[in-house]
Amino acid sequence: MQTQSKPILLFNDECGVCRRIAHWVQKSAQSTSGETSIIERPIGSDPEALRALNPDLDIWDAYATIHVLMPDGSMKLGGEAVAEVLRNLPNTKWFTWSFAVSMFGFRPFQMILNVAYAILADVRPLFGCESCGTPPFWVKPIWWTIKRVKAIFGISIHPSPTPHFTPLSTTGR
Amino acid sequence: MKAHAQLNETPENPTENPQDTAKRHVASDAIRTVTSGTFNTLVLEGEGPMAVEFMSYGCEHCRAIEPVLQQVAVKVKSKENIFRVNVAIEQELAGSYGIQGTPTFVMFLNGREVGRDEGPHPTVSSVMKVVTQPFEI
């Protein structure tokens, strides 16, 4: 297992939303001296390369949810990973103490972040995720409406021949 | 040729979480990955029916079908080989077979394409039908 002195953020390079967020993190993580507080790495397409980073890291899981690989060999996922990223950014670390606040065994601010991450992950297809496939059921009505509105204004839509198929022209290769 | 006459299809386990299934199969991958370097030897010159899934790890539909395909691969193991081609790496190979998207299944027999299917429904019965039907007369 490769070891790093800084956390590694794995991001989905086949998703436009994820690329934009990763770009923002990259910019925010750089100090004035040019040092970065968090390392970013696209998930890519090599399962073995990922296992070299952490033997427990599965490429399918990496694409399913955000992962941050910690220097101690542990992994943070989902909302916990987002909190870790925010902790490592100079502009956002000031409020990240709130994620550790515990009340009656619950961490309310962390729970809000977890829900926010889950919602963002679900709505990614609306904002340009080329590889996210069909949105979950609760997003479908919004997705359908956007498609219809785009069609009215003449914005081309490339329909998939089946609902379980991702056309290559939109996978961001 | 009736390559799959004896295959007994069983319904999917409704109580099993697909993600658990996917994780369970990480250790024992029933699907071999082929590259442009090994495609000819393993698929085109290989003996018996072959099914090749053109996929990408970043494709949500490929992730949905992965645990199902693992189950199918185990069931057809004695009669058919199932391979995967990662189109994110093997773009030229995917292009040479006119792959328009993922997942696309292309079935081969004696080096000849005998069938293909794009984006099958991610259930054992659908995928089983896709990878076995082209070999049945």
Image: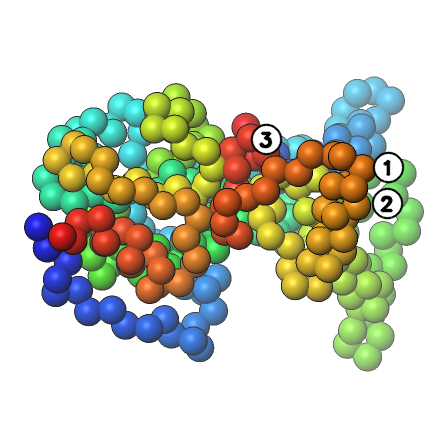
Q: Dot 3, crowdedness within 10 Å: few (<14), some or many (≥20)? A: some
Residue plotted at (52% across, 37% down): A167
Q: Which of A132/B22 is in front? A: A132
Visual colour scheme: rainbow
Q: In the rendered structure, find residue B11 and report the number of the disc placed on it.
A: none
Question: How far apart are labels 1 and 3 at the CA level?
Answer: 31 Å
Q: Amino acid at mark 3?
A: Gly
Residue plotted at (10% across, 39% down): B47
Question: How far apart are labels 1 and 2 at the CA level?
Answer: 6 Å
- Quarter of the image where one finds residue A13: top right
Residue B33 picture location, percent across and down? 31, 38
Q: Amino acid at mark 2?
A: Lys
Q: Which of A65/A140 is in front? A: A140
Residue A109 in sight = yes
Residue A88 in sight = no
Q: Are discs 3 and 2 located on one and the same chain?
A: yes
Q: Chain of mark 2?
A: A
Q: Chain of mark 3?
A: A
Q: Chain of mark 1?
A: A
Q: Are discs 1 and 2 located on one and the same chain?
A: yes
| Residue topped by disc 1 | A90
Q: Amino acid at mark 1?
A: Pro
Q: Are discs 1 and 3 located on one and the same chain?
A: yes
| Residue topped by disc 3 | A172
Q: Dot 1, crowdedness within 10 Å: few (<14), some or many (≥20)? A: some
| Residue topped by disc 2 | A93
State left or right for residue B80 relative to residue A97. left
Q: Secondary structure at mark 1?
A: loop
